Structures are given as C-alpha cells and as structure tokens.
Image (cartoon, rainbow, N blue to C red):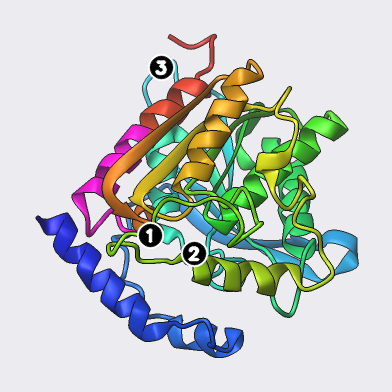
Amino acid sequence: MADQAFVQQTKQYWTKMFDTSADALQLRRNLRGRCPPPRREPLARVHTCGMPGAGGHGEIRLRIYQPWLPTAVGRPARIPLMVYLHGGGFVLRDEESCEACCRRLANGVGAVVVSVDYRLAPQHRFPAALDDAWAATLWVAAHADVLGGDPTRLAVAGEGAGGNLAAAVCLRARDHQHPPIAFQLLIYPVLDQRIPAATAPARSARDVVTIEQLGWFSDHYLGPESTRLQPSVSPLLADPAGLPAAHIVTAQNDPLRDQGEQFAHLLRSAGVPATARRYPGMFHGFFNLPDHMPSAAQAHTDVHAIVRDALHDPQMP
C-alpha cells in the first residue's frame, strides 16, 4: 500500500510538471531540486573530478563513489568498477541526480561507481551524450589503478536514457574490442527509439511517464536528421552477439517494459547470459526512490546481489 500511495503522488507531480508542449530548458529549471532528498548512505569517499570531453568538447564532470570495504585479511587489492549513466530522457538531470542509487550501488556491490555528467539535449543532440559516455568509460578503464579498481571487472550501468547509453557503449566496446566490459546493468532502458511507432504495452492509468512523453524526449535528443534505426540509437535493433552479460530491470507500468524484456530474450538467443526482472506495480523512475518505496529498495537488493556475483573475483573465496 505504501508503494501504491507513492505511485499516485509521483504521477500527480509529474503530470503537473510536464506536458509535451513544454520547453526543455524550462522543464529542466522547474525540476531542479524538486526530487525527494536521498538518504546519504556513508561511503569511504565521494568526490568530483573532471576529464577531457570527447573531441575536445570541454570537460566532463565525474562523481566518484568509493565504498566502505571490510578490513579483514582477504580483502581484494582491486575491486570492481562501474560507470553509471543517469536517466532523464537525454534532456534532464546530471551526475549528482542519482546520488542515492550510486551510494547504494557502491556499498551493495562493493565497487567504485563513477557517475557521468554527459551533455544534454536539445543543446547537444546525438551523438554528444553517447560520445561523452564512451569517453568516460575509456577514462575509467585507463585510470583503474588510480581508482583502486580492477579493469577486468568493469560494468556499465544506466537508467532510462542512461540505459540506452550504457547499451550503446557496450556495442561500441564490442566493435572496438576495448575496453573489456564484463557486465551491463540496464534499468528500464530506452532500447528502441522508433517512438511512438515502436510497440509498447497497453497504456495503463498507472503509467507515470507516457509513450507520448518518451517520444518528446527522443525528438529532442535525435533531432529531425537522425535515423532511429542506427544500433547506437536503438540498441534493440543491433546484432547482440558478443555483448557483455546483462541484467535488465523493468517496471510493470512503463511503456518501455517490453523493450527491456525483449532485449534480454535477444541476448539469450545469441548465447549472452542475460536476466530480466519485472517489478509489479512499479513505474518508470522507481529505481531512484529506494529510500521512499519498499519495491525500489528490494530492486536495489536484487541488483546488488546479481552484479556482485557477476563481478566476483574468482581468486577470492
């Protein structure tokens, strides 16, 4: 019951704040600072640094979360690394907007989590965000020693638009044969941007984000000249062979639900280990609310165990 009450509050809030005639920059200003404040789970260290942007496009901010680790004998010298790409429809949010998620992931997985402030549309259309996500992934792999991480246990994760970027980064890494990404965590990802033409679940009165709104975000990101059939835009249309193992989180009341579940099926059909879990009654965005919804907290617990097992060091007990 607590979950469903919060679902209704979130739906009312989002409906009030957003419509498809909204100006992107005004929407960004309206939403800034309006999300419920996260519980700041203690970590060993959290700090922000900059790295050179893709193609000389200024600096990319990174927020780095270092987990608390046991001090007992047998503690690994190097721990897993995770690049985290926030959601927001390619238009909203920044590297600090997923603070609660990243703190929980760092401690829950036992990994260094690096959140990326990639460029946003409509000022920066495709492929700017993807180029930044790719540059950040290369930077993390190259600086694994400095970060205290193991570059052979590198995961890429993202939610919504960030899930799209994470999947596209994995495609690019496979095609370049570098860096060796071990796992992809995709949280209600955007995988087919032929929106609204793409198939979607029947609209539910409990949907928070609608298919029309998803189309608005895609239009701002892609612009009129981009093709939605490119695998780097719609990873669901890519050849899945050779991609990293994956776990995909979906929500029952999300127009993107079937895309994520179909992608897991395609990966398995290509021999790639992949799992998907649908959370009943949940909506697009719920993973960001672990301090406010029991189902979101449970999703974090599930994800932590799955990613921890996937990135386990075989030399450790």
Whether residue 172 is visible here, answered yes or no, is: yes
- Element carrying mark 1: loop
Q: Amino acid at mark 2?
A: Ile
Determine which residue is flagged by label 3: 73
Which region of the structure is painted magenta? 288-302
Q: Residues within 10 Å of mark 3 (few under 14, many from 20)?
A: few
Residue 102 location, x and y as percent?
A: 45, 51
Residue drawn at x 68%, y 64% as measured from the top left: 118
Determine which residue is flagged by label 2: 211
Q: Is residue 89 left or right of residue 15?
A: right
The image quadrant of residue 223 is bottom right
- Element carrying mark 3: loop
Q: Is residue 171 magenta?
A: no
Determine which residue is flagged by label 1: 203
Q: Residues within 10 Å of mark 2 (few under 14, many from 20)?
A: many
User: Nearest the camera: 191 or 74?
Assistant: 191
